Amino acid sequence: MTVTTRLVIGMLLLLLASQAAISVSALSHYRSQLIEEAQTRLQKAAQLVGREIDHEERQLRAQAQQGDPLEEFPGNDIVLTLDPQGTISTSTLAALAPGTTFPYTALWQRATAEGSASAIVQTPGDHLYLLRLTPESGGPHWRVLGSPIEQAFIDRLSTLNDMDITLLTLDDAGVKHVLFSTLSDESSALDEPLNITQVLPIGYSTNAQVQAALSVSREDVLAPFRFMKYRLAAMFAVALSLAMMISWATVRTLGYPIQRLNDVARQISEGQYRPTERPLPKGGDLGALTQTLYMMQEKLDQRASQLLHRSRQDHLTGLPNRQSAEAKVEQLIEENIPFTLNRFCINDFKRINDTFGYLNGDKVLIEIGNRLRDLAAERGYTYRIGADEYLWLYPCSSMDKPCLRSLGNALTKSPVLSDISPTFVTVSVGQSCYPRHGAAPDALLRRADIALNQAKHLSSHFQVYQSGMDEKHLRQLRILKDMSAALENDELYMVYQPKINMRTGRLAGVEALVRWEHTSLGFIAPDEFIELAERAGTIGALTQWVIGRVSRQIADWRKQGFQTNVAINLSAMDLLDKNLPNKFLQAFEDNCLIPGTVSVEITESALMQDPLEAKLILERLRQFGLEIAIDDFGTGYSSLSQLRHMPIDQLKIDKSFILNLNTQFEDVMIVRSIIDLGHNLGLSVTAEGVENEASLSMLSAMECEIAQGYFFARPLKCNDLIEWVERFERTPLVIPKSTLAGCSGCPDRPGAPSMYSRRST
């Protein structure tokens, strides 16, 4: 519905409502006035009827004063004499026989009280009489004179008052009986919907009251009202027609500018800033407002175009950004044009920022972007889509590897930052193709990114997306998504691998290892979900869960009479958490643990990421009584000068040196050196990965304190561990002291006898 139509309808509805309200009010007032006038007429008529009855009564009173004998009242239908008790002595009416009591008690009582009385009464046979009771002169008797009330009397009153009159009786039960009436339908005398009636009492009956009902026809009274109603309706119709013509003429003058204003405002609200139609010039304020709004729309369109261009442009390199790339990919897919996405990244760009600073790092990004744009200008579209990532969209379904390699070489053959320090960079490339690798923009870009991540670990630094790579990526996302719920719902669980004291042959402690049996993915290897947790920043929550679960388990074991040291593994990210010591302290307080029941293990590489911060965290842990071990020792790049200042208690030799200890002479040399190093630094040494008797004998000969591996037990659940300990304690290991030369399986001493034995119980 247009603005013009709404304006016309609104004006007409307003006029209609106002006229209707005025008309209804006027008609209601006029109708009430007519009814009030009719009621006033009835009241005046009642007064006139009363005066007529009084006139008849005065005539009857005059006759009563003329003489005593009955013969002197020939004009009366009733002449009675009553004794002082109200008994009829003589009567000219057969219905009121002598010797009977005067039946009109109310009239008799009033006459005796006032000295005389008059009233209209109904006699047997439904006749009406005007009776006058007066005392006889010179005696105790009463004289009663009666004059009949006939239809002629009623007609005269009706003609005199110009209204209908009905005489009726009303008994004690409320039953009405019409005696005389000027109405054609006597039963309608008191019908309020048909008549307006005024009722007044005028006399008595033996058991009822005589009333006179004066009435006028309601239809006759309201006849002027109906005429007025039709007249107002005609006037209203004429006024409405004139208003419609005037409103339409007015709206024709105002409607077009308002409609244009509405259209322009709607376009702006919908983000359509470009005008679709220039409004016609109009004079007056509305015309000026229309032109101003149109100019504002043009300015908004220009501003929106500028903002759109800036939002799709990389401010640093001047290349189109990721939003532009997504729009182009979507366009080519809609047009069903095959293309290839080549996603580039600068390898080890963080090193350039750290070495030369962010300002020079930006120069490298600009330089590589310019080179890629120049090299690919005639063969595709170039975008910068990330910090150190670029995208080259090549309009072809595939691109051979030599061509892409030559592009990469051309991109990096000359150094960057020539004015400061010539530096060569390399790039990795991941590729996905439409329609072979997908038909959705986000899927193609994601798969190019997955291929790029694979390319970073290849010597060729080039990888085309292969089927199955996406599934691995989605699996990782699923693991990260479900990890929080798994921690909250205790879907993870702990296992414990025993560690054996090689000097006593008894249990030295256990290492706590976390496991995850996913509801739909099945068993997830710890290395997989722990690495993802470190990358996603959720390792802190996982570590806190492990600390709490292990602390509660130690408390449960203590109640069962079993106590041992439990080692908890920490990641590199944990050593950056300044709240880590408080997490241990809170767990100890919650479970009433004592120092010595828990130790921690940190990898060598994790320790060296931030040695100063790691040292502060480890010193606080040591203050709480926790022993600290360096895990996987020998695989990292730790500095011995830093190592000797670290608050550590134990070295754990990586299992890669232990698994083939009995067959690899080089491993023997490395293990011997690590054990000697640890002892010289005052540290105990643990060997993990012991899987055969020969390696155990050799470690004993090298005076390694603790051994751990499948040779003793695999990681066990808490209940299984208790059973294993009970069996192991019944037949503890006996490892006799020996020299390395006597170790079975030593590379330079093959076939040597075994020194491993069990002490019989």
Image (cartoon, rainbow, N blue to C red):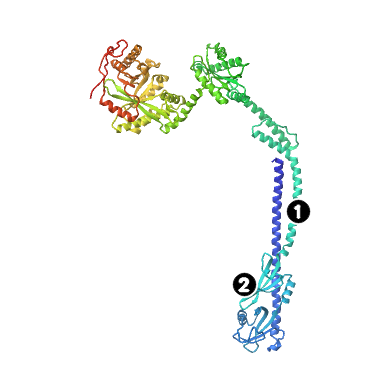
Foreground of the two, 385 or 17: 385
In the picture, measured across the screen, residue 53 lies left or right of residue 735, that is right
Decide: few, some or many residues near mark 2? Use Cα within 10 Å; few <14, some 14-19, many ≥20: few
In the picture, measured across the screen, residue 307 lies left or right of residue 667, that is right
Q: Position of residue 709 (x, y in %)?
A: 34, 21
The amino acid sitting under disc 2 is Val
The correct choice, above or below, for 186 with respect to 585 in the image is below
Quadrant in which the C terminus appears: top left
* Among numbered discs 1 and 2, the one appearing first in the sequence: 2
The amino acid sitting under disc 1 is Met
What secondary structure is marked by label 2?
Answer: loop
Q: Position of residue 667 (x, y in %)?
A: 35, 13
x 69%, y 53%: residue: 21
What secondary structure is marked by label 1?
Answer: helix
Foreground of the two, 293 or 584: 584
Decide: few, some or many residues near mark 1? Use Cα within 10 Å; few <14, some 14-19, many ≥20: few
Quadrant position of residue 648 = top left
Residue 235 — which label?
A: 1
Name the residue beneath numbered marker 2. Answer: 175
The correct choice, above or below, for 196 with respect to 50 in the image is above
Q: Position of residue 304 (x, y in %)?
A: 64, 28
Circle 1 or circle 2, nearest the eye: 2
The correct choice, above or below, for 62 with respect to 201 in the image is below
Residue 482 — which label?
A: none
Does residue 301 show up? yes
Q: Position of residue 336 (x, y in %)?
A: 62, 24
